[in-house]
Each structure stands twice: as C-alpha cells, then as structure tokens.
Image (cartoon, coloured by chain):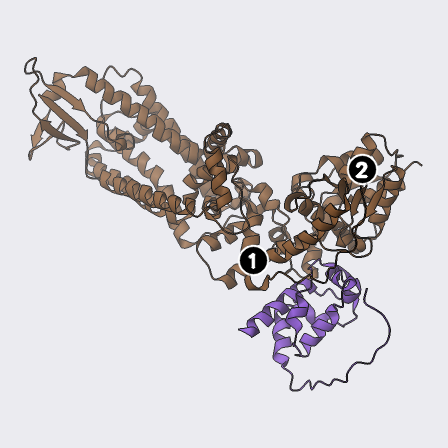
Amino acid sequence: MKISIFPYSAFVIPFLVGVLLLLAICTYKYIHWISQFDEAQRTIIRHNWFSWKTIPALWEMFREGLVHFRILRKNIVLGIMHQSFALGWALLIVVGAIQSNRTIACFNHEQSIEQLNTLIEQDGWYSFDKDRRYLLTKRVTYDEAGHKIHLKYHRPFYAAIFYNYFIHKEPAMFKHSKQYADLMDGILLYIFLGLTLAFAKRIWSKSVGMRRTTSHNLFDRLAKLSLWLIFPLRLLSESITASMYQNGGFLTNAIGSLFNPDISGHLEWASWLCYSLALLVFFFSMPFTRYMHIFTELLLIWFRKIGVKESEQPTGYTKFELNACSRCGVCIQGCPLDKDLNNHRIQPVYLIRGLRNHNRPAKMSIIADNCLMCERCVEDCPVGIDISAIRRMTRNKGKLDSSGNYSYLTTPKPFNAIGRVVFFGGCMSHLTPGIPEAMMRIFEAAGQKYWYMDRDRSICCGRPLRQQGFRNQADDLKKKNTEMIINSGATMLVTSCPICYRSFKDEYDLGIPVMHHTEYIDILIRKGRISVGRDSRRVSYHDPCELGRGCGIYDQPRSVLNAVTTLQKTRNQREKSICCGFNMGNTVLSIEEQTTIRNDALRNLTERPVDAIATACPMCKKAFLHSTNEYPVQDIAEIVAANLIK
Amino acid sequence: MPEFGFSIKKPRSENLDVTAKAKYEELARRVPSFKRCFQCGCCSATCSARQFTDYNIRRLHTMFRRGNTEGLAEELRKCMLCGKCVLVCPRGVNLRQLIINMRKMLEEEKK
C-alpha cells in the first residue's frame, strides 16, 4: 500500500495565489517588453545571448542583485540594508529549500511504521495530529512483494516557506537539523538588521548617511508596509509554533518560551495565515510598485552585459530600465539641484516614476527639463540606469524638432588638411579666446601642423540640441561637421570643449582619433614634443562634468597639471566633482540659481589654500571667471602655454 | 558674413495697443528673465548662426514682444542652441529657454 503525504493547510492558499499572480504578471510584462525591443537590440541579443559575455553577466547579476556590491562601496550602511533584504531573503529560500528537502528525503528513507501508527483520521482526511497539517491521499496500491505499506512524502515548494509549521520533529537521520534551524534564525536576524536600518532611514535618513530619502506615493508605501510585515510575522509564527513543540532555532525558541503554549495553540494558525497574507499582498503589489525592480534589475544587468544599449527612442529596453529603478533615492544625494537649490522633485527617481505611471506630458516636461545633465546621478545610480538617455527621450520635442533648418550652413571649399590635426575650438571657446590661442602656441611649439576648423565661423557640434530633445536638428549639424572633417583628410581631431569632445566621441563616426586637448597635451609632454617649465603656484582642478563623468578623462588633466604646477586635491573631485552650474543640459535654471550652484563648486575648489583654479572646459572657465576676482581661473592649455620652454 | 552698409527699409508701423500683448505676457511668464532684457543686442553680436546668415535673435524676440510673429517660427529654427548668447547677456536673460518657448508657443498657436 502506498500513501502519499502532502504538507498542507488552508493558509498556504493566499501565498500560492500571490506566487501565481506574480509569475503571470511578470511573464506577461517581460514578454511584452522584449517584443518592443528595436531591431538593433534584437540582433545583439540573438548574437550574444549565450556567449562568453554570459559569464560576467551572471557574475554581475549575483554581485549586484544579491550582494549589492556597488551600494556597499558607496555607503556601507545603505549597502547592508539592501543586502540583508536581497541576500537574506534569497538565503532564507535557498536554505529553507535544502532543509525541507533533507527532512523529507529522510522521512522517505526512514519509512517508520510509528509514523503511520500516529495517523489520525478525521472527516475522511488523515493527519499526524488533530491540527490536520498533512493532506493524505490514500492511493491503495498493493505491491507484488506483499502488503508492505509505503509512505511517500511529497515536498511542495511552499514547504520551504512554511517549514516550521509542517515539521515539528526532524527525523533522527537528519543530523544537522538543529544547526539548520539556528542558521535559519540567524538569517532572519540578519534581515531584521536590514529592517531596523530601513526603519531608521524612514524616521531619520541622516542616520544611514542620506540627506534625503525618496518621498513615495501611496502604493509604494503600502507595498513597503507589506514587505516590512513579512519578516516580523514570520518570526512570530515560527516562535508560536516553537512554543507549542519546544523546538526552533536559538531565536524562535527563545521568543517562543515567552508564549503560553495553550494560547499559542489558538493563535498559531491565524499568525501563519497573516504571514501568508502579507506575502500575497507583497507579491501582488510587486509588479505595480517599485519592487518590480527585484527581477527586472537582474534581467537588465544581463541585457546590458551582453551589449544591449539604450536607443534614441523609447523601446522595450527602456521599459526594463524604468522598471529596474528601486526608487532608493541615491540619485537625490549628489544632485546639485537638491543640495544647492532645494529642488527635490526633478531627480531621476521621480522622472522614472512619472514615466512608469504615465504622468501627463506637461508634468513630465517640468521634471525632465530642469536638469543640468551633469550626470552625477548616473555615476551614483546603483542599478546603472542610463538616465541621460531616458531624460533626452522625455525631452523629445516631437513636431518642433524638424530637420532642414540649417541649409544656410554652406560648407566652404574643403580645406586640405592631410597630415594635419584638426582643432575644433567649439562655440564656447569663442568666448574664451585665451584657450584656442594657447592651443595654437602649443601646436606650434610641438611643430604640429594644424587646422583651426572653426576659427571664423563655428558650427555647433549638435550636443546642446540633442540634450534638449532636438534629435533631428542635431543630426543635421552632425552631418555638416562630419562632412567638413572627413573631406579635409585630417588625421586627428583635437577639441577644447568637453561638450564637443563627448559629442565627437560618442555621437559621431569620424574614423579618426578624437582627443580632448588635455589628453593631447599629456601625450605631447610624455613624448617630449614640448618641454614645460614649472610654475610655483598651487592649483586646484575642476573636473568638467562632460569630460570627467561623461568621458572618464580624469588622469590626463591631472598628469599635465602635476607636470606644470602643484596640484591641490579637493574634497569633491573626480567622479564626485560638482557641476559649475552652467552645463548646457539645463535651459530652465535662472542665472541666480546657476550662480548658487557655481558658488558651491567654487567653495569646493578653494577650501584649501590655492593660488589659481584650473579647468579644462571653456564653459566652466567662463562660469568661474564671472564669480571670482580673487583667484585667476585658467584652462590647462593656458597654464601649459604660459610655461612652455622655447 | 552678412554684407554691411546702409539700405532703406520699408516704413513700418505697429500699433502697440492692438498687438496681442497677451503673447508677450505669456512668454514672460514662462521665461521670467525675459522681462529684464534691455535689447542691447549682445546676443545677436555673439550668435554663431549670425556668422553664416542674416539671423538676428534680438530682432526676433523684439518682434515677438510686439506680437509680430509672421515668419518667426521659420526664422527661429535656424538657432543652433549653442548658448553663447546666454553667457554673453549682461542682463542674465535665459535666451535658450526663451527661444525654445517662443518656438513652442508659435507651434501651439498653429494648432
């Protein structure tokens, strides 16, 4: 005779419903989004979905999805909080599954007749005790060898979640059962650590090193409440069960000893039901709230790692990015608009939430337009969402963005610049003539023939237009510039403006090396093509947003400055550099607001005693020039040119 | 470069009492700094587009101010949004915001 034994109690139904809903909704959404990928993105997925790129992708999924390495490095307290929820919960499931697996395997192996003798029949159902914890289906199949009774224990997947309710006494064969129980309690304690931190963050965000937390909407708050309830309810339920059967790990047993076993008997089922209901509420709210990031982030990492990139128009990949945002609020911390202007309504977290919730375009444009595009948030984002691309899409001017506006830009007879370096000053350099002048002196000192492309008339590189959502217009300018540069036959492009530099590097396809002048000067000095003397001044360096965070050029300017002057470190440098406030990305800020941000950047640069301020961007130079008579503000090219040894 | 020299323009008169002042007020609401403009023309002097063609941003925003928007949308499309005018402006007028908003308003009008 064979008896199948199923751990079952009615309270698992809410949990099962929750899991089913979650799976169904997520699968539907993911398939829907993947179908919206554009052709280029699909090709990349087809080519790379299983390649050598998969291994680093899996590694990063583990590292960022569970361990939260990136947040840990930025803010250890916040990192532990996120880690305890993600890793803790995952461990709870994995260890729980192993534990229940072992127990049930042992039960099946033991086949103790005593077990069978303790069966109680009640209303036609069977149970080991009167609480009806097991649903027994009696399939009477006599085997040929005789009439031996065979017990078959089943392990439905919820057995790992509600393990303590179903198993009161582990089989003797399961040797480390006590250690497993302690381990599970330890993991639960670890989650409670995160829960405490999360609570502290809500009450007083500075306690976890955040100036401000995200202000969530009602749905997010409800989902958060259900998440916060899950673990205390689990602890309560397990403790109550432990008090009835004198089992459990170090934590549940200790808490259980506080309960009166008689009362526990009445409360037990209800508390397990509450635990199950909390899971249902959380699972159901997950796809519609910020907790959608849990699975989406993993998929996003995988897509990104195999090479999928954000396109210029919203695609399915954008949907993945929008949904991968956990609204953690890390982007608010560094934002100069929040720090200096107290504007905490426009940060990526709100932009992304607005887009996800399909807010009105008028409301979205207020959020999307007011941003410096300094990319401090991109640098900080623990999920690595391409916020600038999303913002550009949101700023898309639609009908206003018409091509064919620049027919007046007649391209002159192609200049023969074969073997020369093209020097592109950029629009802003026309307002800081010292920079192109210095560059020309450096070119001459190095004996390098050059062509100053925009000496008389400058065509904009197109990036300012692109940042404001005029993609077609930007493409028109790109076409003009590309034509001029390629027709000239030049071998290299050097530009003084980081905005143009990023544009030429990322958006153009020129087929020749593109350098910012700091890179170029660094090479000239290293190769000994120019020799420079030393300047006795102490200089602090301002990292322009587009050059530093935008293109990752941090070392070359420093190496040049170290060769010529004494470089003074500043508190917020490199990735943490503060925008000068005049970044082309913003058209909304008034001059007074820009000045406030600039003063903050200036304070950072002059905290330690310095004799001059160096920068590598005409825009930043102009911004600081307006503000200070106390310190000379110079571009790196100008400092080098002044110290050239003939 | 546009040719310099003297020419006689057709006489033109505008009755400021009948021109739609509301348009200027709406623009000034959207771009508050525009109220500070004293029409010095620095923006036009530095303009990148101006180096190539007869594009005069001071003329254009003055036309808008007076409610004379004929052919303005077409002309404003020539702007490259490079932002030199904003940096040069002695009154701190946010010209990029101004141009984008003029274009938006002209587009809205069309509908």
Q: Which chain is purple?
A: B
**Where residue A354 sits: x, y (%)?**
48, 55
Give the residue at x 68% y 48%. Answer: A579
Q: What element does badge 1 sit on? A: loop
Residue A633 appears in the rendering: no
Give the residue at x 70% y 38%. Answer: A553
A223 versus A368 height, above or below: above
* Residue beneath disc 1: A396
Same-subunit check for callouts 1 and 2: yes
A617 versus B37 height, above or below: above
* Letter of the chain that mark 2 sits on in the rendering: A
Of residues A524 and B77, the one drawn nearer to the viewer in this rendering: B77
Give the residue at x 85% y 30%. Answer: A528
What is the number of the mark on residue B48? Answer: none
Label 1 vs 2, first from the N-terminus: 1
Give the residue at x 22% y 29%. Answer: A166
Q: What element does badge 2 sit on? A: helix
Q: Hey, which quadrant is residue A127 in on the image?
A: top left
**Mark 2 Cα-neighbour bin, 10 Å: few <14, some 14–19, many ≥20:** many
**Mark 1 Cα-neighbour bin, 10 Å: few <14, some 14–19, many ≥20:** many
**Where residue A359 sits: x, y (%)?**
46, 59
* Residue type at numbered disc 1: Asn
* Residue beneath disc 2: A521
A256 versus A577 height, above or below: above
Farthest top residue? Answer: A145
- In 3D space, how far apart are the residues under numbered discs 1 and 2 (Cα atoms)? 37 Å
The hue of chain A in the figure is brown
* Residue type at numbered disc 2: Ile
Give the quadrant of the C terminus of chain A.
Answer: top right
Of residues B85 and A418, the one drawn nearer to the viewer in this rendering: A418
